[in-house]
Image: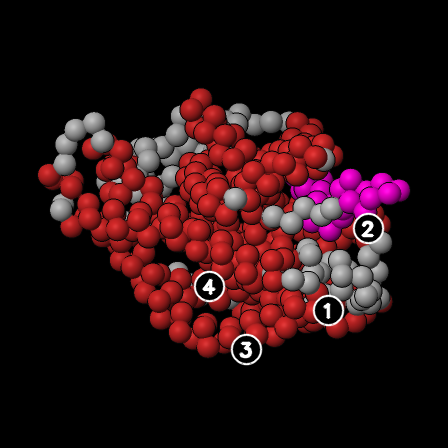
Amino acid sequence: MTSKDIKIGMKRTLLWKWRLWPVLLVMILPVVQSAEEETLQQGSWSDSWILKFFVNLGSYATIIVPGYILIQYFKKINYLETGSGICFPVIKNCIFGNDPKLSNQEELPSTFKNETTESSSMKQALKLLFCAAGLQVSYLTWGVLQERVMTRTYGTTETELGEKFKDSQFLVFMNRILALTVAGVYCAFTKQPRHGAPMYKYSFASLSNILSSWCQYEALKYISFPTQVLAKASKVIPVMLMGKIVSRKSYEYWEYFTAVLISVGVSMFLLFSETNKHPSKVTTFSGLLILTGYIAFDSFTSNWQDNLFKYKMSSVQMMFGVNLFSCLFTVGSLLEQGAFFESVKFMSRHSEFTFHALLLSVCSACGQLFIFYTISQFGAAVFTIIMTLRQAIAILLSCFIYGHTITLFGGLGVMIVFLALFLRVYARSRMKKRMKKTAFNQTPVQKV
């Protein structure tokens, strides 16, 4: 994969984005109008998620637009040949990057070094148990805390009603700053491949990652946590669509079949689940719209990161680059809106919220490290099974702790979704074994 091929792939990705904008605007206008009416029924415009969303976009634009102008300026003056001085290495790495050919020549170490000697079955079993327990504890705790922070009040007493924390962006910033620190420390003390990607290219995945995380937190104000988890489980559908558009990928028949099964299961859950009139439990139109945004942004993030991995970077380098720009965007936006110090004041008023927010960030960062370690040791199939089980347990845990109710048909829909997910894992593993067997049989045997 040459530098020219990578640039052509990135340009094609940006081209389809610009072509889709007019279509998306036409489709979203009536939807936004309906959401505006619902928002006005529920509260004032100051608490409107639509207003917050576009204000956040405006804040990000104050960083993106100057950055874009600088990038175009340095490219126009051919800075690689004319530039010099102390700032040259920084500008070169941020805008032009290193030659991917040089990066490809170096051996790419795994995020966590695999063992070269065979381990006993007991040791492997204990290691798998450690990975599964780490992933389950990290993300189950993260899910419970996420619902607690976004849907419950703090400071409630017999005389005071308490107050809710409203700024989802501040929680995103806290998660990203800790993840950036962990990734930075790990990269500093371990051997990593030579970095080849221009740093600014992380900003695309970072922006979509921020928006997907913001939608994830904001959606809990309008829908139940089980609905959100099930929507995450169904994001394989838009990921496939984005894969065809962004990366020109093709899919097997069983992938389309399981995608249809997931759609049926999610539809059954949404149509037949009981809804309470309490705002935190009812599945509202705004909640579904925000979830759609979450799935779309998250699907773009994964596909853009796939393109970046062509530069032969490690997962922790990707984690560091994306979180670096995420911190830049979120802290800039929070300071511009004056929301940063308001959130800090909320933390000073409610020590319980401070503990929850910090623990939420720790669980998020630890969860990412467990993801990398599990995949490097046992592969993506085992990791997917563990995370699918985690989603099922998260729904049960949320129903037990926060009192969500699911009807018989709604529960059947949940079972269909997870059955489809396990079918995907099984079919993918079978396909990989078949491909390896075919490749082995086609290997020519040398005659002695």
Q: Which residue is mark 1?
A: 270
Q: Residue at x 61, y 62 (%)?
A: 45
Quarter of image, res 263: bottom right
Horizontal and vertical percent position of residue 39? 65, 66
What amino acid is at disc 3? Pro
N-terminal label among 2 and 3? 3
Can the viewer see residue 438? no
Q: Earlier in the sequence, mark 4 or mark 1?
A: 4
Q: CA distance from mark 1 to mark 2?
A: 18 Å
Q: Which residue is mark 2?
A: 402
Is 384 on the left-hand or right-hand side of 298? right
- Seen as rendered, the residue at the extreme right is 158
**Tag 1 and tag 2, C-beta contact below 8 Å:** no
Measure the C-alpha gap from mark 2 to mark 3. Answer: 34 Å
Name the residue type under label 4.
Met
Residue 321 in sight here = yes
